[in-house]
Amino acid sequence: MGCGAIGGTVAAHLAEVGADVTGVTTNQRIATAVQSYGYRISEQGGMRTVAGQISVGVPDGEFDLVLLATQPPQVEEAAHQALPTLAADGNMVVFQNGLCEDRIAAIAGPERVIGAIVAWGASMPEPGLYERTAAGGFTVGRSGAPPDDACRRVAGLLEAVGPAQLTENLAGARWSKLALNCAISSLATIAGERLGPLVRVRRYRRLALEVMTEVVEVARAEGVALEKVAGTLDLDWIALGAEERKKRGSAGLTAKHALLLAVGLRYRRMRSSMLSAIERGRTPSVDFLNGEIVTHGGKFGIPTPVNAMAVDAIHAIARGEKESSRNLLDEIHQATREN
């Protein structure tokens, strides 16, 4: 469900290894491109084409899995549309960033929902052309339950795209990825740039650290035990302490900047999917990222001013009231310094 950058890449790789997979899109241009040329994959400097099925709208039939790869604002509608075709013992697999498993559980039932956290990047430069922008794999599990045979089957299937590991702490992995997305995706949307140039600028890294610190504080209040992102980025460690938030420099801050720079350069070619959504006239997913932090923080009385500013800025960009630029990012950074 959804044949944008992530969905199209997954569909192409599954089709390539012989899986019986049908891509579903609402975009006629994507459907026409795939029907005419196949899924075109740009990877490691090479291009190849994979023949595959694609449909405008949900096709008839019964499916073992519904892979939800829309943007978060469309995920619940996609789940409702696909639910009648899901086999009685089938599962919906949630690829979306944010905390979407609970939303889909309310539609399909918690026992039919598997989370698959995406730790790689892709873009769709033109309809039907899928370019990997960062290597990585998946983390697969269920909310509040250990991985079962269905999770293992999904993980095995997703190995066609990238390495898939199982987790018994999906919430911890989700919240850690959410912290990263709230920082890099939102700041890249506000600036209107790919991640690489931004992460080289110290004040933007500081802003990212402030965003992630708020996420970590809210996650702790929720009782979530955070997992390391991609096995390396320890959010509990990288979150700023009370004294660090008052400082502009220290040995500890230098180490955190260095780690954030290394992670950012790994994903330097990534372009925010929220920015692409805005350019296509669609609703950005900021309410499912930074907006979740503001909402959850409010339940515990935890201030989340930097995430709130990111939400306001991105909505203003989507409404055409402001333009994505570094100047807008600088305004937010200056506001954090003043506070």
Image (tube, rainbow, N blue to C red):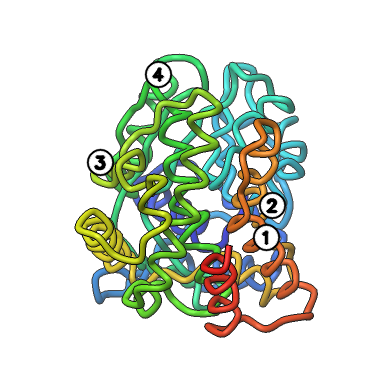
Q: Which residue is mark 2?
A: 287
Residue type pointed to by label 1: Val
Comes first in the chain, label 3 or label 2: 3
Task: Residue 132 in the image: state x and y as whole percent.
Answer: 36, 65
Mark 1: secondary structure: helix
Foreground: disc 4 or disc 1: 1
Residue type pointed to by label 2: Asp
Task: Residue 261 in the image: state x and y as whole percent.
Answer: 28, 66
Comes first in the chain, label 1 or label 2: 2
Q: Which residue is mark 3?
A: 231
Tell me if label 4 and label 2 are in contact, CB under 8 Å. no
Residue 57 placement, left or right of 158: right
Tell me the CA gap for discs 3 and 4. 18 Å
Tell me the CA gap for discs 1 and 2. 7 Å
Mark 2: secondary structure: helix
Say few, some or many: other residues with alpha carbon within 10 Å of mark 3 (under 14 / 14 to 19 / 20 or more).
Answer: few
